Amino acid sequence: MSILDMTAVELAAAIKNKEVTVKEATEAVLDQIEKSESTYHCYVTVDKEGALRKAEEVQKKIDAGELTGPLAGVPVAIKDNMCTEGLLTTCSSRILGNFVPTFSAEAVINLEKAGAVILGKTNMDEFAMGSTTETSAFGETKNPWNPEHVPGGSSGGSAAAVAARECFYALGSDTGGSIRQPASFCGVVGLKPTYGTVSRYGLIAYGSSLDQIGPLCKDVTDCATIMEVIASHDLKDSTSVERDDTDFTSALVDDVKGMKIGIPRDYFGEGLDPEVKAAVLKAAEVLKEKGAIVEEFDLSLVEYAIPTYYTIAAAEASSNLERFDGIKYGYRTEEYNGLHNMYKKSRSEGFGPEVKRRIMLGSFVLSSGYYDAYYLKALRVKALIKKAFDEAFAKYDVILGPVAPTTAPKLGESLSDPIKMYLGDIYTISINLAGLPGLSMPCGTDSKGLPIGVQLIGDCFKEKNLIRAAFTYEKARGAFGRKEEN
Amino acid sequence: MVNIISDETIEYVGILAKLELSDEEKEQAKKDMGSMLDYIDKLGELDTTGVEPMSHVFPVHNVFREDVVTNTDDRENILKNAPEEKDGMFVVPRTFE
């Protein structure tokens, strides 16, 4: 087996058994980046020297028996909205085009403690606002299954890097589907954990009440293993939750007998591509054959999730992005007339159109006279959406549905009509509003040869149900991957 | 479009958002915001009387910790990111005459 075909857990085991060195693995993946990056453009920054230096350090610690974990020595890619000490962190925005953090995100520190080798920073929609990675200020990423198509977004670079074997796994972030949707479009596994499970410290905020960091990886075993490493209670993130059930790998069990799985009818209505629908329902059938109790139900309120989300996310974004003012870091305009003009010009030149659109909308819905009608209304509907999920989870262990209404669209087709693009988030977005965990994994390909994803949604803190169902399905489904040309 | 955004509104929101939009961007912003608000108005179909706004999904409260300094002085590196610095400080444009 080629090194690049290994999963993260397989590679770490091979390193432990001295079949592969950390340096060999790092060089292999750097070679792959060199070969295919000009086609896919998964990365904003590749830190070749840093990775090779780290590989040697990690190898020494493994040899000395100081690093024994299941990810020790495995090269990883980090989405470019997570701070990495000494390594450029741009959020794919011109306004942070030269920003070098003086500290690392807690999730990144957790990975490094586990012996990760950081390869670089992956491309994304600017400030994670977008569903295609086309709003990046540094060029679009292409889908490794077909470079004429988008990889999804906003964690498109991370998903594409895993699919193109330009890393062994990656971190992404998910505010409205930004891990699960690109995972689906690129045929990899992605998990958005329960809100508060992974520290947001060092994650450049978009919608703070919705943002969560999670893994993008090759299979469910990697997913559970990475989660076990990155989940932590962090005093530096006041919304971090203390959990004593983060032994996610204990849920890698090939058995769903008696598990109750609900299929929301309202996730299979108008707008869903028939090929996606068929593949997702087939995955449900597989779990039924394995002993799960599968039934349909009405979730309700599905069509209200998108307007609720865009109100709340835009409001939080307008507030969070106020810090980019051209003073302490980032871009400052060349010519200006006084302080306020400097703020305005720096921001106007530094932010791209989608970011400005959301800042404007957010500023409006928070403004005096509109705050109650828009922002508080959205928070009230959020409470109703949460209640609808509470009722569903009183009956079911897992909710199963599609990740996105279609497979990956072609490049250049999405940005012209924002609302149409936002509609693509319909199945992922309410999960963030309700703080729930959601897992995306491949369940087939369409007639164009593009991957289709199935989404498993759990109640808060019930990632283990998702992992068990996903692991069981994966065993029944068998291997899933892109045919490599080389 | 039901929500017609006036020039004054765009001007005002631009001030709140600290964004200086070109005339072309302003026209686009009027269109975009109008159609987004039309879409968001859908929430008006739901009766939310008596429903408390939910800002956080879990019943969490303020989190307190002791005010203890744990980081070290990193001024030099922090200032490296500043567009302009002088004598270990950030330089800002003159704010009053």
Image (cartoon, rainbow, N blue to C red):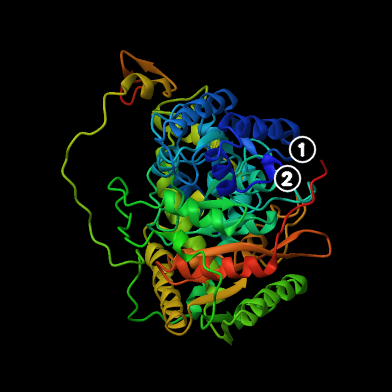
* Quadrant position of residue A180: bottom right
Residue on which the image places disc 2: A142
- Tell me the residue that label 1 is attached to: A39
Of all chains, the one bearing label 1 is A
Image quarter of the N terminus of chain A: top right
Residue A47 location in percent, x, y? Answer: 57, 28
Q: Are marks 1 and 2 in contact (CB under 8 Å)?
A: yes
The spot of residue A392 in percent (x, y) is: 47, 81
Res A275 → quadrant: bottom right
Q: Quadrant of residue A325?
A: top left
Rendered view: B14 above or below A362: above
Camera-side residue: A383 or A351?
A383
The mark that comes first in sequence, 1 or 2, is 1
- Residue found at the far top of this picture: B87
Tell me the kind of residue under disc 1: Thr
The answer to whether residue A36 is seen in the rendering is: yes
3D distance between C-alphas at marks 1 and 2: 7 Å
Marked residue chain, label 2? A
User: In what element is the residue under mark 2?
Assistant: loop
